[in-house]
Image (cartoon, rainbow, N blue to C red):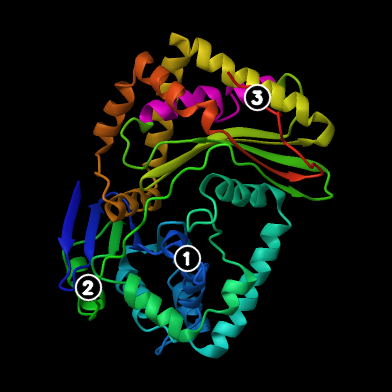
Amino acid sequence: MYQYRTLSNGIRVVAEKIDYVKSIAMGVWIGSGSRYESKEENGISHFLEHMLFKGTENRTAEQIALEFDSIGGQLDAFTTREYTCFYAKTINSHIETALDILSDMIFSSKLSEEDILLERQVIKEEINMYEDSPEDLVYDLASRAVWGDTPMGRTILGTYESLDGITPDLMRNYMNKHYTGVNTIISVSGNFDEKFFELLDMYFGVRNISNNKPTLEDTPYLSGNNIIRSKDIEQVQLVASFKGIDVMDDDVYSLLVFNNVFGCGMSSRLFQNIREQRGLVYSISAGHSAYINTGVFDISAGMSVENLPVVASLISDEVNRIKKDKLTNEELNRAKEQLKGSYILSSESTNARMQGAGRALLIGKPLYTQEEILKKIDNVTMDSVSDMIDRVLDSSTLCISAVGPVNSVDGLFNLK
């Protein structure tokens, strides 16, 4: 059962008490990601994520690491297109120490010129790493293909040029605009008592921050846009993208059921028919990414360049087959049971529960109980799955991205 509180400065809290564990997972969720950035600011959300670990007015970077290690805790963060999350997990006897460190990082970070110079180079090395990883690079190209030169289409890491323009003042101004009460969620899952809420107000609620709420512009999906990065490497990494559904669409459970059969996991049609039966790829899968007012469904594969035409032809066959014949009753029921099992297993992780609740509350999505979600999966029907297949696998929305020894993807797929 979720408990909801609002701290005195507007920060909202969602907390789920789990008595049978001895730990607690906490996340501070902020509506700050690459989708909120101008072209000149590209990469600043992720850059700030790094900088908050570089030291505060009260602790050095080393002290932050040592203090968390000394309580046997875990401290980390990540940045996406639509949010940044700083999260910690510790045994419940060390809750106050974790809150002290997290609040110190978020509200008292130094953001010194010296640290920014150093960390800028670290992030440039991270960009280099992605450039040398075709499996990652192709997804950056896919985002650019479907959303163009917009905040949604640009990389989360930024570019050399945009990073060079990010100064301490720019960071502070960006934080003042995005790290605000109404734009921050604290999500908690684990074993705690009522005193925990007093500690939250002590370490977070007393901070004087604005209540500015940044806005997001809608980003149109660009159909028929292809992007290639020619590289002299052994494989071609390929992504076929289709217009997906947004994060608020409750029909997502029908999509998950359909993709469980089509492209998710080792039992899926794509994996079985193209990898297991023919051995033409090492990796092949399909997945959906949902965002505010937009989404994308991707089919990805990696193969030798000589196998590219036949793999694309086989993917086309699988897309055309599922659009024509849909699922069998056996596939529908098996997929629903598999989804329920996966969801229940993931629900036994306090970190996963904390992340699900924090993300949902930040973007304004309803929080469902475990029973409600299982019922939504049970309520998926053959008709709802068939409608979702037709809606998502619309060949008119196809965009193709590729990295490797290839110069063209024109005419690669034959979709009906």
Residue 121 to residue 158: above or below? below
Q: Mark 2 points at which residue?
A: 199
Earlier-in-chain disc, 3 versus 1? 1
Eye-nearest disc, 2 or 1: 1
Q: Which residue is drawn at 16% across and 64% down?
A: 6
Mark 2 residue crowding within 10 angstroms, few (<14) / some (14–19) / many (20+) = some
Which one is nearer the viewer's eye here, 271 or 343?
271
Q: Name the residue under label 1.
A: 76
Residue 219 location (% of width, % of height):
42, 50
Mark 1 residue crowding within 10 angstroms, few (<14) / some (14–19) / many (20+) = few
- In the rendered structure, the answer to whether residue 136 lies left or right of residue 22 reads right
- In the rendered structure, the answer to whether residue 319 lies left or right of residue 329 reads right
Residue 392 to residue 288: above or below? above
Q: How far apart are marks 3 and 2 (CA)?
A: 54 Å
Mark yes or no: residue 337 visible. no
Q: Does the magenta stretch include residue 32?
A: no
Q: Which residue is drawn at 54% across and 44% down?
A: 146
Which one is nearer the viewer's eye here, 416 or 374?
416
Q: Which amino acid does label 1 sit on?
A: Asp
Q: How far apart are marks 3 and 1 (CA)?
A: 38 Å
Give the magenta-colored segment's residue range.
253-273
Residue 333: quadrant of the picture: top left
Q: Mark 3 points at which residue?
A: 315
Q: Which residue is drawn at 64% across and 72% down?
A: 160
